Structure formats: structure tokens, C-alpha cells
Image (cartoon, coloured by chain):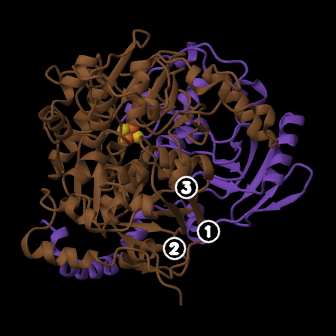
Amino acid sequence: MAGKTLYDKLWDDHLVAENPDGSALIYIDRQLLHEVTSPQAFEGLRLADRKPRRIDANLATPDHNVPTTSRAQGIDDPVSRIQVNTLDANCTEYGITEFTMSDTRQGIVHVVGPEQGYTLPGITMVCGDSHTATHGAFGTLAFGIGTSEVEHVLATQCLRQKKMKNMLVKVDGKLGHGVTAKDIVLAVIGKTGTAGGSGHAIEFAGSAIMDLSMEARMTICNMAIEAGARVGMVAVDQKTIDYVKGRPFAPKGEDWDAAVAAWQDLHSDPDAEFDTVVELRAEDIEPQVTWGTSPEMVVPVSARVPDPAAETNLIKKEGMDRALAYMGLKANMAVGDIPLDRVFIGSCTNSRIEDLREAAEVARGRQVADSIKQAMVVPGSGLVKAQAEAEGLDKIFLEAGFEWREPGCSMCLAMNADRLEPGEHCASTSNRNFEGRQGQGGRTHLVSPAMAAAAAVHGRFVDIRDLEPVQEH
Amino acid sequence: MEAFTKLTGLVAPLDRSNVDTDAIIPKQFLKSIKRTGFGPNLFDEWRYLDHGEPGMDNSTRPLNPDFVLNQPRYEGAEILLARTNFGCGSSREHAPWALLDYGFRCVIAPSFADIFFNNCFKNGILPIVLEEKIVDRLFAEAAANEGYRLTVDLEAETITLPDGDVINFDVEPDRKHSLYHGLDDIGITLQQADAIATYEERRRKQVPWLFND
Ligand code: SF4
């Protein structure tokens, strides 16, 4: 019999029951809650007169609606305010730990979980948010669920699931200078398409992946959903263990030793079989820029915007035509000629300390171009913000003309006040370039933090690999 | 949840692939803490010419005449015909809530995004996967025939076309059972409370650091 994949192991380890109808009941170790997808779940519990099964298996923080300007005045938008207040009230009522808006530990759930050591190897973790795949970077079985399932987990600590297929995305070799995890994952999506991973749990492996830091692995797993997969994972290695050690929710003392011993098996067996395998060479990956309205509409920065006339699949061609019209771009134009209005550095994909360091490295000693109306940096959590300030990154950004904001989802989805105006182009480190995602009529181009910072100072996309070092004076 | 047994309904064709949940229900409407009332804002950015915000009187907003659901011939549609990867993107259950609130009980497409597909079943909507060729045929027929209706029979797993042709589809037995009887998933799972308790006790011994109560 073939060996097990990492996903097989995690699945087997959490199997509560296999039902005759082919479904399975799996145990959920931890859940993250935020204000947008939880109110109806709590309401459902109340209506059915049910209680959460395990209070200690939930951690909450508001992130989607919170303002990124000063928090002192609370939230202006009354509808957003009700939603955040509802989360506070639900957590208070049931005794669930919450990092409220004024807590320095508040932030985007997918930044907060790992930062707190709440995300641990070998566990199952869910959240009413599709980017829950982020936590798979720790050898965690983590996936996004809908609100009914949030309620289901609250009430039963389990989910009814079908086992997914196994997919291996293997990236071997050495990344070029200036090429980052974001470019890897965009290149993968460019290759597989946004439905390529449907029905699969993806394991990212290969030397280029294992060479990455934990934060970079999170960037990759974060966007598994943009490849169509609910789950993205990386095997546990020493980096994983070192990252988790000492964090507030991580096991301590004897528990720690037992945990580390238990985590040694969290990798696919050498003879494990995958249903689908995709391979890339790291050397072939260039900095990536999306040109269209789906993450698969992506090209290397040195390339041109594709021409629908060359597409033989009619439905695809129509999709490309529609995307070009929405984006206000012409086929065959150089990526460097795409006009830009705003720059957004943030989101659960790229708002961790390393992302901010990479962007600050580019911003240091340079100035945001006059043609850019706004360039904002939004740290992923209050702790990331504090760390960045301790390192002086805020000063670098502010001196270069970037705005330095309070943590939250911000312009990744524009549920708060941060948004694009119709027709504006934005170089964004987030994960979705859908129509209207960053504001109605807004046009999003997904890039890495360094590429976004470089786009801010040049007023257009440039190849980060060509950037001259700033002269010291 | 309302049971889904058999439905004869008008078909509205939405001829785009990769329709994401941001398009199905834009984020500004996710601020609601209710499950209902999303129907008037289904496909908001395509459906109206102005920018929609919660609390607006949708009946006075300018409609986009080019958007398919605004054509009088599709008024009252209950079956949505869609293209590949329908429902991709965010996990928001507001997407099926909006479809349901608008009046759709069934979505037919060559493929769906996983989370959306799952969310449909929790809300009394039947998502049906059919081969691309068959979906193409339905698109062509729906466009050519005003008042084009299909009969979807969950029990028999069949779709009957106006000309009497019958198309079979598959639905997983457990999902079918819940949807057909309108059952609450939590109630079903709680019937396995003993198995959950047994697992939990074992897990507590294995990984005590995950239990902080
Ligand atoms: S940062 Fe963006 S993608 Fe991430 S959780 Fe927030 S809204 Fe979703």
C-alpha cells in the first residue's frame, strides 16, 4: 500500500466517524471567528437553544470592518459598528476570548492565529473565511467554511466532510533575486487556473518551498483558494517548530516536548501518491503582475498584456475581452505601461513583518511618485505594527510618502472606508483582483510587497530586479 | 431549511465563467447581521447602474437594462444557469442567502467552487453539475425559447427538458437526504454525540495542550 500524504495523516487523525452514506465526521480542534461571518451563526445557536460545545476552542477578533485610522473615535459607519459590536457581545455572552478593536493583539484573523501560536501543527482549524488555508503553512489542516458550518462547529466541534483529493505543487530550485513567495503562488495559479485545485487539498513542497520562511509559506498557502483549493499545506520542519515556540497559545514545558515529538510525522511519506501533480522550477519564476479580473490572469512583469485574439477557447476569450474592458487595458500593451493611481500594501497575504521589511527596503530613501494619489501600508496586526515601529519601518514609509495605518483587512476588500474610486488602478499585495473587490469599478493588480513599493515610487510597474540601490549619503 | 423535492422553474442564463461571490453579493451588504433580505442586492454591481449601499431603497435605483436578470422574460426565474467555477472566491454564505432570497432554488453549471457548493446545500439550494456540452445546450435553448422551464426532480436525480428529454445528474447521498427532507445538519450530527465524546476524550489525553478549559 502506498504511503500517506500529509493531508491523509491529518484527516485520519481527526476522523470521528465514517458514515454509511460516504460522508465523514471530522473533529475540529480550533476555530477563528470574525465579525462578518459569525453573527448569524450565534443567532442560529440561540434560536435552537444550543450552546457552544467548547468555549476554549474559539478565538475571535474583528478585522474586516475596522477602520485603519485612529480607533479613538470608534467606527463611523453605523452598519459596520453594529457588526463589530455584535461580535463583542457574542464573545462576552459566551465567554469566548476576543482581541477587541482596542487590543494591540487585534488584527486580521489569519495573521493573529499564527502570531499567537493559536495555529499549531497537526491540528484542524476552521474559520468562516476562505483564506483560512493560510494556516496550512504549519502542517495544519485548515480551511474556510460558511456561516452554517461556523454554527455547526460551535455546536458540535465537528464538521461533516467528504475527503478531498491530494494535489502536490512542487517547486524546486532557487528563486531569483527579488522574486518572492507571492510570485511563486501567482505563477502556480497562472499555470493551474483558478479552478485547478478544485476538490483538492494542495501540499506545497520542493526545495524552493522548504527554503522559504514561515511567513512566506503562509503567503503561499493563503492563496491556495485562488487556485481553487480549500486547503494548502506545507510539511512541518525545524522552521515550523522554531516559529511556534514560546508563542502565547503554544504548548509549554513538558507539553511542548510531547508536541514536538508528535509533530515529527507531519509530512507526506516518500511513497505517498497524489492525484494531481504540478511542478515548477523556481528559476523560471519572474516577478508577477495580474492584468485581469481573476488571479489566473497573470503575467511576468517583463511580459505584455495578453491578446484575446490568440485564445482559441471561446468562453475564455470572452472572459479576457470582458476583463480587458473592465480594466481599461489594451491587448499587447507592456505591463510597465499600465497606469497606476493607488498602492495598497497589506492583507492576510502580505502584511506580516517580513512583507513590511521587504517593502520598506524598496521605499527606503525613495519617494512615492507624484502621480500616485495614495500609497498605504496596513500592518496585519497590532503586534506587527508595533514590531515594525520598533524597527523604524513606519518612519521609512512615512518619509517616502506612504500612509501608515492601523491593522485590519482594509483595502483588500474595502468593507471599511479604504477603497478605490471607479476606474482607479491599484498595485495591491492582496489576493483577489475581482471586479469591484477594492471598491466599485476599481481595478486591482496583484503583486508582491516589494513590487508594490517599487510601483509606488516609480508610478508604474517596474521589474524589481532592475531597481538600482539608493545612494547612501 | 426548506426541503427541495421537485421544482419546475423558469431558467435564467448567466453567461460568464468564474462568477465570484463578491459579484453575487458585494461586500457592503455583508455588514448585515441577518440571513435574509439580500435578494434585492443579488449581483448588485451588474444589476444596477448606480453604486448600492445597505439601507437604500432598491426599487428606485436605475437598473442596468443589459443585465440578464433585468430582462422581463426572466422575471420570476428559479433556476440559474451558469458557467464554470461558479461561486469562486470568498466563503460568504451571504451568496446563497442572496440567491435564495431572490428566488433561486437551483443552480446548474459545469463546475462550482467547493465552499459555495457546500453552502448551497445548507440553505435549500440544489447546485447541479452537468457536462459542459449539456450546459451549452441548455444555454442555447434558454436563449432561443422565451419562458424556458426545466423540471428538476431531486429524488429521481433528473432534469426534464421542455421537449421531454431527460438528463440525469448525481448528488451525494448524504447531501440529497438532508436537502430532500429539509434537515438541520447540526441535528443530524448531534445524533452522533457519543462518537464525538469518545473521540474528544481520546484527543484530550493525546494532545492535552489543546484543551484549556
Ligand atoms: S485581508 Fe482580505 S482576504 Fe484576508 S481575511 Fe481580510 S478581507 Fe479576507
> In the displayed image of the protein, which residue is found farthest to the left?
A253
Question: What is the CA distance from the residue labelled 2 to the residue labelled 1?
Answer: 9 Å
> In the displayed image of the protein, which residue is found farthest to the top?
A370
Q: In this view, does A105 lie above or below B161?
A: above
Residue type pointed to by label 3: Asp
On the image, the x and y values in percent for residue B65 come to 71, 18
Which quadrant would residue A261 be assigned to in this image? bottom left
Chain of the residue on which disc 1 is drawn: B
Q: In the rendered structure, find residue B208 and report the number of the disc placed on it.
A: none
- From the image, state whether disc 2 or disc 3 is nearer to you: 3
- Chain painted in brown in the figure: A
Q: Residues within 10 Å of mark 2 (few under 14, many from 20)?
A: some
- State the residue in front, A201 or A27: A201
Q: Which residue is drawn at 54% across and 20% down?
A: A441
Does the CB distance between marks 2 and 3 fall below 8 Å?
Answer: no
Instruction: Classify residue A99 as left or right of residue A189.
Output: left
SS state under label 2: loop
Instruction: Classify residue B39 as left or right of residue A316.
Output: left
On the image, the x and y values in percent for residue A424 come to 51, 17
Q: In this view, does A7 lie above or below A219?
A: below
Q: Colour of chain B?
A: purple
Residue type pointed to by label 1: Glu
Q: Which residue is drawn at 75% across and 57% down?
A: B130
Q: How crowded is mark 1: few (under 14 residues within 10 Å), some or many (20 or more)?
A: few
Question: What is the CA distance from the residue labelled 1 to the residue labelled 3?
Answer: 14 Å
Q: Which of marks 1 and 3 is nearer the N terminus?
A: 3
Identify the residue under disc 3. Answer: B114
Identify the residue under disc 1. Answer: B172
Q: Quick check: can you spot residue A46? A: no
